[in-house]
Image (tube, rainbow, N blue to C red):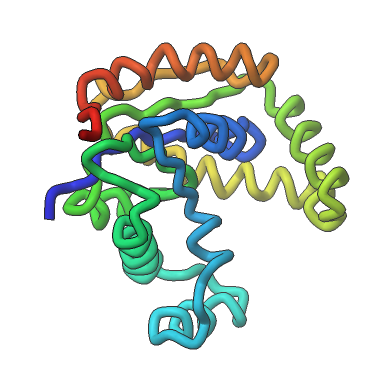
Amino acid sequence: MTPYKAVLIFGAPGTGKGTQGKILGNIPGFYHFSCGEVFRNLDITSDLGREFYEYSSRGELVPDELTVRLWVQAIHAHTVLGDYKPLVDLLILDGIPRTPQQAKLMSEYVDVLKVVHLHCEDEQAMVERLRKRALKENRYDDADEKVIRQRWQVYQRETFPLLEYYPQKDVVAVDSIGSPGRVLRDVLDQVVPVQDEHYVHPL
């Protein structure tokens, strides 16, 4: 198969990856697909679904190989349904790949043309943002500062090294502190040229 052309929205918890991805997904020529969507819509009666549930029900991390297989199956289904058109849409990745190993496993399926690194030097600002979001969504367990800081530690240990996997010329930093509109403007400055280069106008 021809790898899907994609942009990866990357960043620590609370930097707004999902927000920016959803906004981009509403713009013609972009298709936002998050790893969270894959798991939320998982059919646990399928073979892959049962295998996933065996790990998650025990509170264990799902192996990279299984995570990628689930993702490949899900994105393929969206191409069959026709809501994602690989020749027209630039795929916006959010939440996957999450580790260098996942990136290696996905390399035959996805051609990551740009990595937009939403970064923030102020960890406390990110903690406050995550706490407010958790309270707004009635996810009170996620509002615990210890839980939030644990997520940051996991990100630093397991996910941040992913930046070293991609060629540095393809990685750009965008400051995630500011209004969503300002951050979106800076993200668009990076991803629109990629879309211009690879966009094929539908007949």
Where residue 53 appears, as percent x and y from the top left, is 53, 81
Q: Is residue 76 above or below residue 97?
A: below
On the question of residue 44 being in view, the answer is: yes
Front position in the image: 4 or 170: 4
**Going by the picture, which residue comes out furthest to the front?**
203
Front position in the image: 36 or 83: 83
Where residue 34 appears, as percent x and y from the top left, is 49, 49
> Is residue 125 shown left or right of residue 97?
right
> Is residue 122 shown left or right of residue 200?
right
Front position in the image: 24 or 113: 24
Residue at 36% x, 60% y is 81
On the question of residue 64 being in view, the answer is: no
Q: Is residue 92 above or below residue 59?
A: above
The total of numbered circles placed on residues is 0
- Quadrant location, the C terminus: top left
Residue at 48% x, 47% y is 95
Residue at 32% x, 37% y is 89
Where residue 197 appears, as percent x and y from the top left, is 21, 20
Residue at 24% x, 27% y is 199
